[in-house]
Image (cartoon, rainbow, N blue to C red):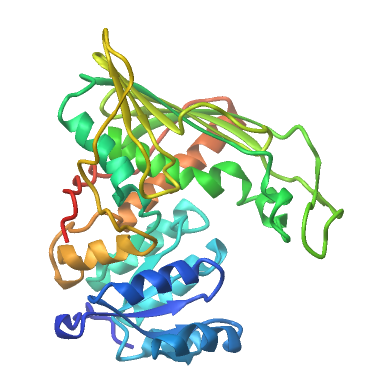
């Protein structure tokens, strides 16, 4: 196997092999198809027919996972498997000399995440991680306002995600209510990544959880009416203390109905910002300063056309895959810090004690308006 750092062929663009042709792959395929610098060369899936269906319209090959990670025309493996398989696929790809970009969360747990990043570093390779929604104009316009001092010094933030639960629409929602699932691990990466983009890394956390319902009823599909057990927290509240001194309160819940709260609000010494849904790339940013009314801010930063896969493209455009140190924004180090924050909130809730994080990360560089 090739254990040396992979040399990306810039003349051919970034050659991508996808592992996992599930639902989310369609969004990545659409992005790859419209960005000239990205080229799909192979797709692998446990279901070879599904791999063929994803690959052939794009002129790519359907391969086994083993064939794909060894393929000479693959520079980076796009890992779209379930979280439990993230580490296995990533480690195999790194051992074969491939860079990796994966869906969130980085791994099933922080220990696996450390193993993945250590292996990549030793091999001179890069691991990137979703979400990349923070590269869009929504979060980046809010970042621009913060950096310009529109609301003074940031003091605190609230981040709120309240839904009735995915069993109402998902035909197979069992995973969301098992260990490794729940609202925090499912949706938390979007909110925590955005908070880190806006306020920087987190030093320690506190948390509380509940699960008031022991069963859920599937609301759609062939299993409609079936009861499934709840074996993990369905409501999680976390307090994140950022190294900057700002304090964020995060609520993720499958136990509510809806909320009128802004997905994220940032409060500063001179005003407040309302930030759009971090699970989207755009949206409206509003600000209020002392003695004034809420006003919508013009789009000022971010990729206007961003979609799933821009985190991978951003790594390529920044030179991360050709040796530029710490280049790109959706890096595995950020994904690892987000993962440890989530695990630590759950641990803090279990032990009724604050938890100090062992990882940190530099605040990702801001994105200028339409840098490409």
**Where's residue 334, x and y in %?**
33, 50
Q: Which quadrant holds residue 103?
A: bottom left
Of residue 288 and residue 327, the one placed in the foreground of this image is 288
The residue that appears at 27% across and 12% down in the rendered structure is 292
**Where's residue 318, x and y in %?**
16, 62
The residue that appears at 48% across and 26% down in the rendered structure is 354
The residue that appears at 51% across and 75% down in the rendered structure is 20
Count of numbered marks? 0
The residue that appears at 24% across and 76% down in the rendered structure is 36
Q: Is residue 219 left or right of residue 319?
A: right
Q: Is residue 60 left or right of residue 99?
A: right
Q: Is residue 179 left or right of residue 243?
A: right
**Where's residue 197, x and y in %?**
29, 40
Q: Which quadrant holds residue 258?
A: top right
Furthest residue toward top: 291
Q: Is residue 236 left or right of residue 38?
A: right
Judge whether 179 appears above or below 363 on screen.
below
Q: Is residue 235 visible?
A: yes
**Where's residue 44, x and y in %?**
49, 83
Of residue 157 and residue 247, the one placed in the foreground of this image is 157
Q: Is residue 200 visible?
A: no
Of residue 86 and residue 44, the one placed in the foreground of this image is 44
Judge whether 120 appears above or below 201 on screen.
below
Q: Quadrant of the C terminus?
A: bottom left
Q: Quadrant of the N terminus?
A: bottom left
């Amino acid at each position: 196997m090739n254990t040396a750092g992979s040399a990306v062929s810039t003349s051919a663009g970034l050659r991508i092999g996808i592992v996992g042709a599930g639902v989310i792959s369609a969004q990545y395929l659409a992005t790859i198809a419209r960005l000239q610098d990205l080229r799909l060369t192979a797709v692998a899936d446990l279901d070879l027919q599904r791999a063929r269906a994803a690959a052939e319209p794009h002129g790519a090959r359907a391969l086994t996972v083993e064939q794909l990670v060894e393929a000479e025309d693959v520079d980076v493996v796009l890992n779209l498997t379930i979280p439990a398989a993230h580490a296995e696929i990533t480690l195999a790809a790194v051992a074969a000399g491939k860079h990796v970009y994966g869906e969130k969360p980085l791994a099933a747990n922080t220990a696996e995440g450390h193993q993945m990043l250590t292996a990549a570093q030793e091999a001179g390779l890069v691991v990137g991680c979703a979400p990349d929604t923070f590269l869009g104009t929504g979060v980046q316009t809010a970042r621009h306002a913060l950096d310009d001092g529109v609301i003074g010094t940031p003091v605190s933030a609230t981040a709120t995600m309240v839904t009735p639960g995915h069993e109402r629409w998902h035909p197979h929602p069992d995973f969301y209510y098992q260990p490794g699932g729940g609202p925090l691990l499912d949706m938390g990466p979007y909110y925590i990544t955005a908070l880190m983009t806006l306020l920087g890394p987190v030093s320690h956390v506190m948390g509380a959880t509940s699960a008031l319902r022991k069963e859920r009823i599937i609301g759609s599909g062939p299993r409609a009416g079936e009861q499934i057990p709840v074996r993990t927290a369905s409501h999680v509240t976390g307090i994140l203390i950022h190294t900057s001194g700002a304090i964020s309160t995060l609520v993720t819940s499958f136990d509510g109905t809806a909320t009128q709260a802004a997905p994220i609000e940032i409060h500063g010494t001179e005003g407040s910002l309302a930030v759009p849904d971090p699970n989207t790339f755009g949206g409206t940013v509003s600000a209020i300063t002392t003695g004034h009314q809420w006003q919508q801010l013009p789009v000022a930063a971010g990729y206007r056309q961003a979609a799933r896969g821009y985190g991978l493209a951003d790594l390529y455009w920044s030179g991360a895959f050709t040796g530029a140190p710490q280049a790109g924004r959706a890096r595995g180090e950020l994904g690892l810090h987000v993962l440890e924050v989530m695990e630590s909130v759950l641990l803090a809730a279990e032990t009724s004690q604050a938890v100090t994080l062992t990882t940190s990360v530099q605040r990702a560089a801001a994105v200028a308006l339409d840098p490409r």
